[in-house]
Amino acid sequence: MSSNIASNTASAHLTIDLNALADNYRQFQAMTDDTCEISGVIKANAYGLGAKQVFNKLKSLGCPQIFVATLDEALSLRVHDKKTPIAVLGGLFTGAEKEYLTNNITPVLNTPHEIKAWSTMAKNENTKLPTYIHFDTGMNRLGLSADEARALINDQSVLNSLGLQLIMSHFACADDKDHPFTQEQADKFAAIATHFPNAKKSLSNSPGLFTDPSYHYDLARPGYALYGGNPTPHLKNPMKPVVHLKVRVLQVRNVKKGETVGYAASHTFKKDTRTATVALGYADGFLRSNSGSKSGEAKLYYNDTACNVLGRVSMDLVSIDIDHLPNLKQGDWIEVLGHNQSVDALAHSAGTIGYEILTSLGNRYKRYYIGAE
């Protein structure tokens, strides 16, 4: 749903501020040289916020290209846009090579096998296909290993039929400003880059953008920070919040001392307490680790007042303590994410990272977009 008008039928409202996202994108542009392209990462349905809507917003800002994780993600965007360059971080899927070519999608090549297959296709099509290559500099997930990189550097003949446009790597620890591994990776990438002088270079993810300007190169790939997440956990968040989530109060109860709440009777009331049951659960991405078993560490907010989570988080429901809020009533709205609680703060209380919070936001939420194109 693209309207920002609240619905009486909704048990929750997830508001996505695309104007704030645009401001975050402009901040990346302002902090890099004019020669550095800012290419948005919108994998996993734009981190759970809506790939189509984010894609359209980024296009309106002049974003030169988009990165996604899978071919299916790229194909779903091609339904709406035939021209904007889209790259697939997951590489070239065996048996689906023609889909990339037919739909103007560029695989980020991660293995010698993928490079050879892409080269063969280029020869068969009698054209130099746009080519991106990922060099692993120590993360050990995707990309050419050190030995594979060395072999390619020593014999680049397989690239003769290709139009090598970009080489890239990915930081593992850039969100830790003092971690020595970041510079180790940067040094390895810089050494590799000297062997491909005509290709653009890309190294920085969201935290990499804030770590060292020398990491910016020709193209940066912000993801989490684009959506308001903090790329600098050691500092105040420099990004504007994009996500706001509120949920309905379904019932208000007066619970007696000695009674319990929720599954496993995990919380026993030490005094008579007024509680509210709200339309929120782990099916909506409010993780069970937020259950109120850690001295009320997880909190929700009514206006600007914190309410402790009580007992177990269940699939559809959460109970909160409202003993200090005598005017709260059924049908009122409770803030989960907003100016009182950021994505990173909620992640901290759940013992996880903000990326998981965003990508777990449930499909039951009605999504309202501010500033949609």
Image (cartoon, helix red, strand yellow):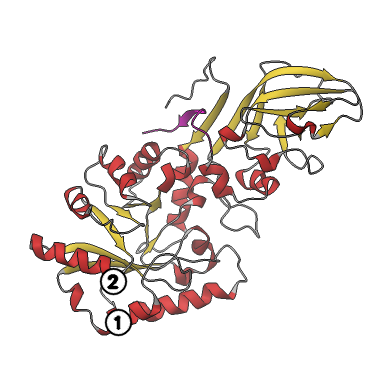
Q: Residue furthest bottom?
A: 154
Point out the stretch of residues depicted in magenta.
Answer: 361-373
Local packing at callout 2 (Cα closer than 10 Å; few below 14, some 14-19, many 20+) is: some
Which residue has dot 1 on it? Answer: 151
- Eyeballing the image, is 278 above or below 152? above
Q: Position of residue 288 (x, y in %)?
A: 66, 39
- Which SS does the magenta portion mostly show? loop
Which residue sits at x=73%, y=37%? 299
- The answer to if 364 sits in the magenta stretch is yes
Question: Does residue 1 appear to the left or right of 126 in the view shown?
Answer: right
SS under mark 1: helix
Q: Amino acid at mark 1?
A: Ala
Which residue sits at x=71%, y=23%? 277
Which residue sits at x=48%, y=69%? 139
Q: Quadrant of residue 166?
A: bottom left
- Eyeballing the image, is 42 above or below 319? below
Q: Quadrant of the C terminus?
A: top left
Number of dots carrying numbers: 2
Question: Does residue 34 appear to the left or right of 131 in the view shown?
Answer: right
Camera-side residue of 243 and 267: 267
For the residues labelled 2 and 1, the Cα–Cα distance comes to: 9 Å
Which residue has dot 2 on it? Answer: 112
The reply to whether dot 2 and dot 1 touch (C-beta < 8 Å) is yes
